[in-house]
Image: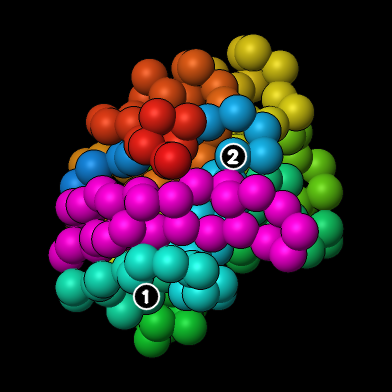
Amino acid sequence: MLMRGVGLGHWFPATAALFSRLSFELASGKVYGLIGPSGSGKSTLLSILAGWIEPKEGKVEKEGIAAIAWVAQHPFGVGKRSVLDHVSLPLMCRGADRASAEREASELLEQFGLAEAKDRNFSALSGGEGQRLMLARAVAKAPQLLLVDEPTAGLDRRTAASVNERMGQLSHRNMIVVVATHDEATMSACDELIDLNKECG
C-alpha cells in the first residue's frame, strides 16, 4: 500500500495558500506526523487524503487503499452503549458473528489498555479512555489508511501520554497512519514527520 501527494496545494476563497507544492510518499507500517502551526492546513490536508476535498493543485495517488478510517479530535460515541459494543460493531459489519466479534474486540481493547473498561458505558469514560477507544474502533474497521486529527487536544499530560503510547504501537499494523498534531510527545510517537511549515511555499 502506498499513497503519494504530488505537488499538492490548497486555499480557500479570499485567503492565502495554506500550503503549496507539497509532495510526499506514505507507506504502510508507518505512522506519519503531520505538523505545522495552527492554520497551516493540517486538518485540510487530512480531508484531502480522505478524498473529501479536492486539492486546488496537484493530486493524490493511491495504491491498494480501499478503506479509510478517521479519528476525530474529540471522542464521540453512544453514551449508553458499552465500550465492547463500540468495537464489536465494526467487526460485525465486516461479517463476524457476535461471539467472534466480541472476542476480537476484547483483544483490541486489551492492546489499547481498555480491558478493564470493556463493560462500562461510553458516557463513563475519561477523555483519554475515549480517545483510545476511538483508535481501537478505527483499527477494528481494518482500514488501509487511518487518519487521526489532533488526538491529544484538550487532554492533560498524563492522559495524553496514554494515548501517545498507543499511537506509537499503530506502526506495527498493516496500514498507513497519518496524525495531525502540534503535540511534541505525539510527534515523538511517529516514525516520520511532514512539516507543512517547511514543505509549503
Quadrant of the image containing the N terminus:
bottom left
Judged left or right of residue 165, residue 180 is right
Q: Earlier in the sequence, mark 2 or mark 1?
A: 2
Query: What is the three-letter code of the residue carrying label 1?
Result: Ala
The percent position of residue 30, horizontal first and vertical second, equals: 24, 42
Query: Residue at (18%, 62%) from the top-left corner?
Result: 2
What residue is pinned by disc 2?
A: 40
Quadrant of the image containing the C terminus:
top left
Give the secondary structure at mark 2. loop
Q: Residue farthest to the top?
A: 157
Residue 184, placed above or below residue 112:
above
Query: Residue at (43%, 67%) from the top-left corner?
Result: 57
Q: Main secondary structure of the magenta part?
A: strand
Q: Residue 116 is drawn in which quadrant?
A: top right
Residue 67's tag is 1
Tell me where the magenta segment starts and ends, as one range: 1-28
Query: What is the three-letter code of the residue carrying label 2?
Result: Ser
- Whether residue 75 is visible here, answered yes or no, is no
Judged left or right of residue 48, residue 1 is left
| In the foreground, 143 or 120 | 143
The percent position of residue 136, horizontal first and vertical second, equals: 48, 51
